[in-house]
Image (cartoon, rainbow, N blue to C red):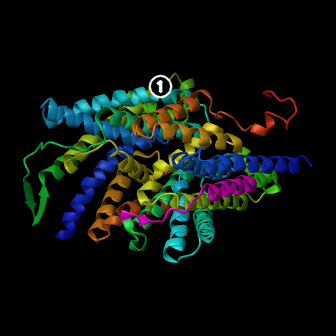
């Protein structure tokens, strides 16, 4: 009952946000520059939320998320540019291939733990990037030219789908199994939870939505290059999740929105931006290692319209 | 003969990896932290060496020693400021902090001097020695000699001195070491100092050998040195040496076979294979899962 209420509240909220922004765009208040920032915000939210399911919910430390984004970007671009398919089909293909890549990478590496898993995912992401760098079909180092097809509508619909699926996964039986792995893997194994299965499932879902974000990203710009998807991109995504709070979906989304705005203002000073990013990362880890929101969700701050306030 | 030539190149590259890998493996052995900032200490070493040789016009060996000393100080500062509070934090928090420190060092360097590369001055006349029909450049011999001397020195420090004994004790069991009256904090700082000094030396050697340095040069060698450390068995000092040298040779062979664009992938493929087949590495000990 309560969950379905949350679902409807979220849906209505999403519709209202969409209507308002779409209205502003059609009136002409939001010009192309702001629309671009909005689309980037959507992409970053998707990336953050899709990494949140891997790190925040399942507790598997992956620092190679940009690799799956690259898979989604390149395969959706191949579908639309080389095969002439429409954009939604291209996005689906990109997301599907990214999920497959997630399965392929996840099955061998998720046996590893902690630091080793982190390094292995980083290694896989680099391998994926180097493969795209060496395949001439997708343009190699020069990159692949792509028509700009993403609109605010595509980006927003994708974000809503991403958040709905991942929120529902988290609240389901599977999600609770994943959370138990995060809390104590050995104990959840002893309770009869198939830990490998849930880890791989969470990894594949995360990769799927990273691929979707990659597809949107690829069609938002005129060119994609392998260098875009290096480990700096993975670290960017990691920063959203960590800053928002490991285990908080709304935290990850808020951090993604906030940092997108900050970085669009600092776009002309990339070094300053990175210095601020890294300082924030260090300071948050030293003084508030659980991130800004901890494992709390924003919904637990206001209990649906009732008098809220912060519940500590 | 071509192949022996490539082998020599591989060993030169591998000894740079080995020097960096030693720092990784020592730090990991003692506080179980992948010090991502280690590759950037290597970069700082290269730049300190560059400024020492090109601007202050001092010789190669004094520059090497200055770079090592300054890097040791930088390493201790990083440890004291960023990592010390995280001794009891989760592994993820420590790892993220290390990534943050790494990004911070890179971008502070870019902020102050720009991202443009710098050409290392020539420190040795470009001569090559002909041994049995193989041309070995003087720089390769210098690199090898410096590496061997540093490694012997390290073995001496770890096995014959008091601080080395303390380091081995802390890496075995920090709590027991503290009960035995060992100053664990100082020992960890000493480990960072030694590891960072080796990375600084590797930086200067890298600059002399490849003649091109830039602020982001530490990222990839840093990762590869970590791979070398894992390959040799993380926490094991001979493992880091063997792992570094083998990785250098493998990379050079992959390049020589005509797959130079795949060179970086080779290292990561090795990493994944070793992690899946034998995660404890060549010289590593197996640890059993404890509840």
Q: How many marks?
A: 1
Closest to the observer, A19 or A142: A19
Residue B198 image offset from top left, x and y in percent: 32, 38
Which quadrant of the figure has residue B63?
top left
Tell me where residue B124 appears, x and y as whole percent: 10, 45
| Nearer-the-camera pick, B86 or A265 | A265
Residue B105 percent coordinates (x, y)? 39, 35
Q: Is residue B222 left or right of residue B123?
A: right
Q: Residue at x 27, y 54 (%)?
A: B13
Q: Residue at x 65, y 34 (%)?
A: A290
Q: Which residue is mark 1?
A: B81
Above-or-below relation of A35 to B190? below
Give the SS element for disc 1: helix
Q: Which residues are magenta?
A: A141-166
**What predominant SS class does the magenta segment belong to?**
helix
Front-most of B136 and A96?
A96
The quadrant holding residue A289 is top right
What residue lies at 52% left-to-right and 58% top-to-bottom?
Answer: A220
Asked if residue B52 shows in the view, the reply is: yes
Residue B288 appears in the rendering: no
Q: Is residue A309 above or below residue A148?
A: above
């Amino acid at each position: 009952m309560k969950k379905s209420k949350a679902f409807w509240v979220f849906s209505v909220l999403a519709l209202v946000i969409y209507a308002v922004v779409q209205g502003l765009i059609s009136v002409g208040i939001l010009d192309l520059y702001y629309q671009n920032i909005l689309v980037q915000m959507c992409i970053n939210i998707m990336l953050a939320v899709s990494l949140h399911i891997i790190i925040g919910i399942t507790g598997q430390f992956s620092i190679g998320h940009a690799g799956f984004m690259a898979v989604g970007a390149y395969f959706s671009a191949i579908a639309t540019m080389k095969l002439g398919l429409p954009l939604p089909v291209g996005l689906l293909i990109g997301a599907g291939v990214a999920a497959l890549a997630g399965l392929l990478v996840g099955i061998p590496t998720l046996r590893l733990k902690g630091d080793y898993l982190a390094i292995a995912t980083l290694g896989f992401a680099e391998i994926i990037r180097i493969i795209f760098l060496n395949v001439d079909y997708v343009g190699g180092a020069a990159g692949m030219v792509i028509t700009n097809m993403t609109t605010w509508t595509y980006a927003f619909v994708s974000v809503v789908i991403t958040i709905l699926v991942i929120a529902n996964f988290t609240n389901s039986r599977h999600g609770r199994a994943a959370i138990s792995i995060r809390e104590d893997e050995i104990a959840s194994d002893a309770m009869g939870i198939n830990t490998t299965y849930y880890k791989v499932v969470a990894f594949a879902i995360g990769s799927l939505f990273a691929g979707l974000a990659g597809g949107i990203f690829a069609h938002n710009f005129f060119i994609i290059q392998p260098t875009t998807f290096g480990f700096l991109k993975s670290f960017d995504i990691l920063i959203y999740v960590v800053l928002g709070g490991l285990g908080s979906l709304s935290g990850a989304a808020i951090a993604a929105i906030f940092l997108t705005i900050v970085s669009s203002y600092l776009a002309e000073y990339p070094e300053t931006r990175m210095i601020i990013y890294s300082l924030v990362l260090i300071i948050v880890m030293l003084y508030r290692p659980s991130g800004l929101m901890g494992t709390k969700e924003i919904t637990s701050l206001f209990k649906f319209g009732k008098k809220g306030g912060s519940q500590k | 003969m071509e192949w022996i030539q490539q082998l020599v190149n591989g060993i030169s590259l591998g000894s740079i990896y080995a020097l960096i890998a030693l720092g990784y493996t020592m730090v990991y052995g003692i506080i179980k932290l992948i010090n991502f900032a280690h590759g950037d200490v290597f970069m700082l070493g290269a730049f300190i060496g560059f400024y020492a040789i090109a601007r202050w016009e001092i010789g190669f060996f004094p520059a090497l020693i200055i770079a090592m000393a300054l890097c040791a100080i930088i390493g201790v500062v990083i440890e004291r400021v960023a990592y010390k509070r995280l001794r009891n934090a989760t592994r993820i928090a420590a790892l993220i902090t290390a990534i943050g420190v790494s990004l911070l060092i890179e971008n502070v360097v870019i902020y102050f001097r720009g991202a443009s590369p710098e050409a290392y001055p020539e420190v040795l006349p470009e001569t090559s020695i002909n041994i049995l029909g193989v041309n070995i450049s003087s720089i390769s011999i210098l690199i090898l000699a410096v590496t061997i001397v540093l490694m012997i020195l390290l073995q001496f420090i770890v096995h014959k001195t008091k601080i080395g004994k303390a380091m081995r004790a802390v890496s075995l069991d920090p709590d027991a070491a503290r009960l035995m009256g060992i100053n664990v904090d100082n020992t960890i700082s000493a480990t960072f100092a030694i590891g960072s000094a080796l990375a600084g030396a590797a930086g200067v050697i890298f600059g002399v050998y490849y003649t091109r340095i830039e602020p982001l040069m530490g990222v990839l060698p840093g990762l590869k040195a970590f791979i070398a450390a894992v390959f040799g068995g993380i926490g094991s000092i001979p493992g880091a040496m063997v792992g570094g040298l083998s990785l250098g040779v493998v990379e050079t062979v992959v390049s020589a076979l005509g797959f130079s664009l795949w060179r970086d992938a080779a290292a990561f493929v090795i990493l994944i294979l070793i992690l899946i087949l034998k995660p404890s590495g060549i010289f590593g000990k197996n640890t059993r899962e404890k509840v």
